[in-house]
Amino acid sequence: MNYSGTDFYCDVALKGEVFLQKEYESNNILAYHHTRPHWPVHIVVVPKKHIDSLTSVSVNDGPMLIELFDVLKKLAAKVEQEHGAARILTNLGKYQDSKHLHFHISSGEPVKKGKE
């Protein structure tokens, strides 16, 4: 799938326009295996409410953030148990391809990509 917008999550993933191998879903949060993984284990955790980035979070997002961090904690612990290590990453500014708050849970060395 070629996507050229700025918010893959609102435009595609949360609308169900692409198959996602889900790890968790509630009314507020979606966690799934990345559609184009950068690591052997690569899970994305995203709030369903549009929030531009970590620096855009407001006090009103508190209940959603509690659930989000609980999901991050549980999935990262699962990845660590299964693979021996896990990392959690979020990006800001020009490092953020999709302008929607999201976190990556990953394990392993970066996947080498061939010519696309």
Image (spheres, rainbow, N blue to C red):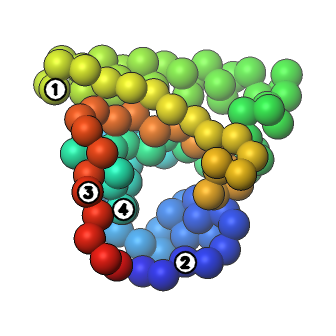
Q: Nearer the viewer, mark 2 or mark 3?
A: 3
In primary-sequence order, the first of circles 4 and 1 is 4
Whether residue 96 is visible here, answered yes or no, is: yes
**Residue 52, position in %: x, y?**
76, 47
* Callout 4–callout 1 Cβ contact below 8 Å: no
* Callout 4–callout 2 Cβ contact below 8 Å: no
In primary-sequence order, the first of circles 4 and 2 is 2
In primary-sequence order, the first of circles 3 and 4 is 4
Residue named by callout 2: 3
Along the viewing direction, whichever of 40 and 78 lies nearer the viewer: 40
Residue named by callout 1: 83
Residue named by callout 3: 112
- The quadrant of the rendering that contains the N terminus is bottom left
Identify the amino acid type marked 2: Tyr
Q: Quadrant of residue 24?
A: top left
What residue is shown at x 22% (from left), y 45% (from top)?
A: 40
Q: Locate residue 62 relative to residue 48 in the image: left or right.
A: right
Q: Locate residue 85 relative to residue 55 in the image: left or right.
A: left
Mark 4 burial class by Cα count in 10 Å: few <14, some 14-19, many 20+: some
Along the viewing direction, whichever of 29 and 87 lies nearer the viewer: 87
The Cα atoms of the two marked residues, 2 and 1, are separated by 31 Å
Q: Locate residue 18 relative to residue 89 in the image: left or right.
A: left
Q: Nearer the viewer, mark 1 or mark 3?
A: 3
The Cα atoms of the two marked residues, 3 and 4, are separated by 15 Å
Mark 2 burial class by Cα count in 10 Å: few <14, some 14-19, many 20+: few
Residue named by callout 4: 35
In primary-sequence order, the first of circles 2 and 1 is 2
The Cα atoms of the two marked residues, 2 and 3, are separated by 21 Å
In primary-sequence order, the first of circles 1 and 3 is 1
The Cα atoms of the two marked residues, 1 and 3, are separated by 19 Å
The disc placed on residue 7 is none
